[in-house]
Image (spheres, helix red, strand yellow):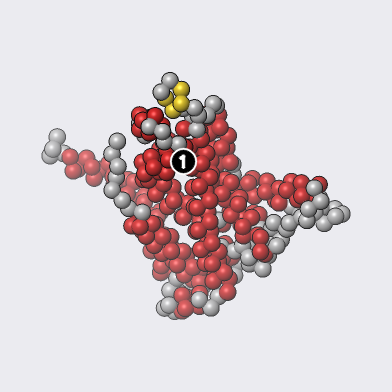
Amino acid sequence: MRQGKYPFIFGFLAAPVTLYVVFVIWPYIQAFQISLTNWNGFSAPKYIGLDNFKNLFSDDNFVAAVEHHVVMLIALPLVTVMIALFFSFLLNLGGKLQGGQLRGVRGANLYKVIFFLPQVLAVAIVGVLFQTIYQKGDGTNVPDGVINGLLHAVHLPTIGFITNPAVALWSMIGVMVWQAVGFYVVLFSAGMASIPKDLFEAAALDGAGRFTLFFKVTLPLLWDTLQVGWIYLGVAAFDGFAIVQVLSIDNGGPNHSTTVLPLEIYRNAFTYSKFGYASAMGVVLFFMTLTFAALTMRVTRRDSIEF
């Protein structure tokens, strides 16, 4: 058995590794090569060195997209994790102490299903849905959306959620948070369910309140799951293409106030036929995402707590 171990392993891994190299690694290598050319998608590419990368920093749209990603990188993980942790704690440990056992709220499993529903909706459907919710009427043919209709009913000024440059990006982030929260409620709930209930019950019997249970018991034991969730959300903050494409005005408007790098890559490649320039943006986005993931894992690394 030992003599045939390595041939078996190599034979088992040959197909998936080959597929990964062909469909993941090789496209990355091609993107790096194309980023050093002025290829327009039709004629033969011409090598121009690092000119595409130099031009990026004088491109106002690229700079604006990077700034938007920075905002999303702070807001999206922070808000989503806070909301998801709050609901997860309520669902799993928010009930009363009965018979010496700490219980969640009644109907917790049903609530988890309801929270998770936005995650299974297609992004295009979510975008169209929030167009209706965010819509600002013009007083004639276009009616107010759900939120502005409520504001109008109580005689408050309506808000241009997707037409006001100062508000549009935050409206996009709000949609991303709404769609993501359900997944992380389920993820954190699974993490909390794996923690022995004896720890919570012992702390509760010793007089620990909900605040102490959450910050002194739950968070330390849930740290690895939080780290994974934060990285996932950070990677999602470097995307946002589908929501912005469907929901925003003029694909990243108004006045590029909601544009993101994937959208700029798409626009430069398939609208302006600047495949070399778009590939340079893609390379920058790749290293930004990789750097974020590596730094997050490094900064949040800590000794595992065994229980």
Residue found 45% across the figure and 70% down from its top? 35
Residue at the image point whose x is 35% and y is 32% from the top? 199
Residue 213 visible from this viewpoint: yes
Looking at the figure, which quarter contains the N terminus?
A: top left
Q: Quadrant of residue 217?
A: top left
The reply, left or right, for residue 196 in relation to residue 31 is left
Tell me where residue 242 appears, x and y as whole percent.
58, 54
* Image-based side of 85 in relation to 64, left or right: left
- Name the residue furthest front: 207
Give the residue type that dot 1 points to.
Phe
Q: Decide which of 199, 136 is in the foreground and name it.
A: 199
Which quarter shows the C terminus?
Answer: top left
Q: How many marks?
A: 1
The 10 Å Cα crowd at callout 1, few under 14, some 14 to 19, many 20 or more, is few
Work out which residue is located at the far left of the displayed protein and give it.
Answer: 3
What residue sits 56% from the left and 57% below the top?
241
Residue denoted by label 1: 211
Identify whether 24 is placed above or below 192: below
Could you tell me which residue is drawn at 62 percent across and 60 percent down?
169
Residue 212 is situated, as x and y percent measured from the top left of the image, at 43, 40
The residue positioned farthest toward the top in the image shown:
99
**Residue 5, how many percent across, how many down?**
17, 40
Q: Quadrant of residue 172?
A: bottom right
Depth order, front residue of 187/272: 187
Question: Which one is in front, 240 or 223?
Answer: 223
Classify 18 as above or below 193.
Answer: below
Residue 265 drawn above or below residue 151: below
Image coordinates of residue 243 in percent, x first then y, are: 60, 53
